Image (cartoon, helix red, strand yellow):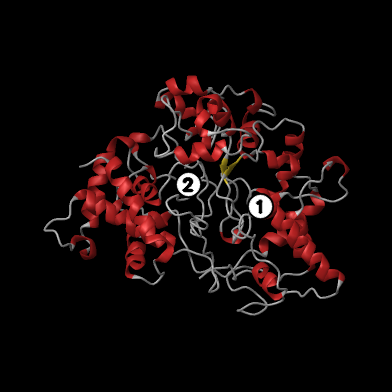
Amino acid sequence: MRSLSVILPVLTFLIVLMGSSVRADSPEVELGERLFKDPRFSYAGNFSCVSCHFSPDDRRGYADFEARTPIPRRLEDSHLPQLTLRNTTALIELFWGEKAGVPNLLHSDGEFQTPEALVIAGMTGRNMGWLASEKNQALTKLAQVARLYPEIASSSEPTVTDDEAIQKVASLITAYMRSLEFSKDEQGDFNGSPYDQFLKLNHLPEKPNPGEPSKLYGERLRLQIEGLERDGKLQWISQGPQGERMARHDQAFRFGAAELEGLKIFYSTPPAAPARAHHSIGNCAGCHAPPAFTDFRFHNTGASQEEYDFTHGQGSFLSLVIPEAAQRARLTREELAPFAQIPDPSDPKKADLGAWNQVPLFPNGPDLGHLFGQLFETLCNFIPTCTLSQWRVYENEVLRASVGAFKTPTLRNLGHSNPYLHTGNRARIEQAIQMYIPMGLMARQRRLRNADPEMAGVIINARDIGPLSAFMRSLNEDYE
């Protein structure tokens, strides 16, 4: 079997070619969904992609609603973790805003640059019951099951090779995942949530102008809303396509005064002197950029530090020894393994450093064609004056900036993706928001290790949790 290094560039080309033009009702998407749900690819024939990313009629989130997902048991690996490292994320709208030839990094730590690479790794990995030593066996079975589908086995060539069968499975499942999009109008603008309808009803800007930073857009939106309020022209949303109540969420289809108060906090940004601010500042759009409410980038909001300190005592994460670039480059896979583990009371070396585990270190300079070169470049953008041409100067800074950093999840349809955070330790939206009260304070006091720069600008209190929760629930929709 040819190396996956040969397959992956071909897959990348295919997905750029297919893009988001594949219709949700196309034969490719329909076949991709069947493959997505087929348990025969797994070791024991009893797990499929849908085992973790399912969508019942009343909770269409393509998640499993577990804090961490149980891993299929194997007697041979009873000593290994029996839960996934992180919470299962929803699959809807993974590819919004993707630029041609530059796909969004996938997994919460940016492990995969292409959806096809994610599909192959997922279908041959621990979530499907396969051991690390069984990679070739898993790939062979993937190809064998794929050829049971006439649409894959039929080819202009006499025989479909293993590589070709694997490539087709990855491309078809990718087409299915790309079809999982939130409702949009003919112009491609989101239109399924009460928030979207509120903006449309009041003729408010639904997204930033080209090149406009999301925080400036938020300020512009707030000023226009305040103008409508002063003139008595602001209109509320009190019902949607299904009437006053949502069909798949236990809430009203509403955007009213409470949701608006949350919107104002959400889009508020720090003044020149935050300590003198007389109102709450969410500073949320710096990471949860509208209209998708994610920037698809990586930020440290303190979730890993919170979980580690809860396990080992307040302040423990600050003293955790984390290798610098030169040392990390010399460590074996086994020596690096503790930095991608759930914190363990019996082993203080175990911690989840997020994107730190994926940052490539280049002994001869950064190769932008490298599978993970995009992650290096993304993190470099967060460091003033950092340039790839001076990669050696900034290598340690980039690595430090990745500690505890995770990809920003979308805030759309949160009602179908709980529990929240990569740790899965927040069951309700209110609980997830509450975390930002102490974390914002810790960032300002420099007690949050590698705090994202935006975190110091989060100045909220317990009174803000209700309005912010109402606003975020206004981003829910009756996803079809």
| For residue 90, above or below residue 22 | above
The image quadrant of residue 125 is top left
Q: Secondary structure at mark 1?
A: loop
In front: 248, or 467?
A: 467
User: Seen from this angle, which residue lies furthest front?
Assistant: 389
Residue at 81% x, 70% y is: 228
Residue 463's x, y, as percent? 82, 53
Residue 402's x, y, as percent? 56, 34
Residue at 71% x, 69% y is: 204
| Horizontal side, residue 80 vs residue 400: left or right | left
Is residue 23 visible in the rendered structure shown here?
yes
Residue 414's x, y, as percent? 60, 58
In front: 193, or 229?
A: 229
| For residue 219, above or below residue 480 | above
Of the residues under marks 2 and 1, which one precedes in the sequence?
2
Residue 376's x, y, as percent? 50, 36
Count neighbours of disc 2 (C-alpha within 10 A) and say few if under 14, some if 14 to 19, many if 20 or more: many
| Horizontal side, residue 312 vs residue 336: left or right | right
Residue at 71% x, 54% y is: 216
Task: Measure how far apart labels 2 and 1 are at the Cα level.
Answer: 21 Å
Q: Amino acid at mark 2?
A: Leu
Task: Check contact, mark 2 vs mark 1: CB within 8 A.
Answer: no
Query: On the image, numbered disc 2 is attached to which residue?
Result: 105
Is residue 38 visible in the rendered structure shown here?
no
Which quadrant holds the N terminus? top left
In front: 145, or 190?
A: 190
Q: Foreground mark, 2 or 1?
A: 1
Image mark for residue 213: 1
Residue at 60% x, 36% y is: 304
Q: Secondary structure at mark 2?
A: loop
| Horizontal side, residue 444 vs residue 347: left or right | right
Q: Amino acid at mark 1?
A: Pro
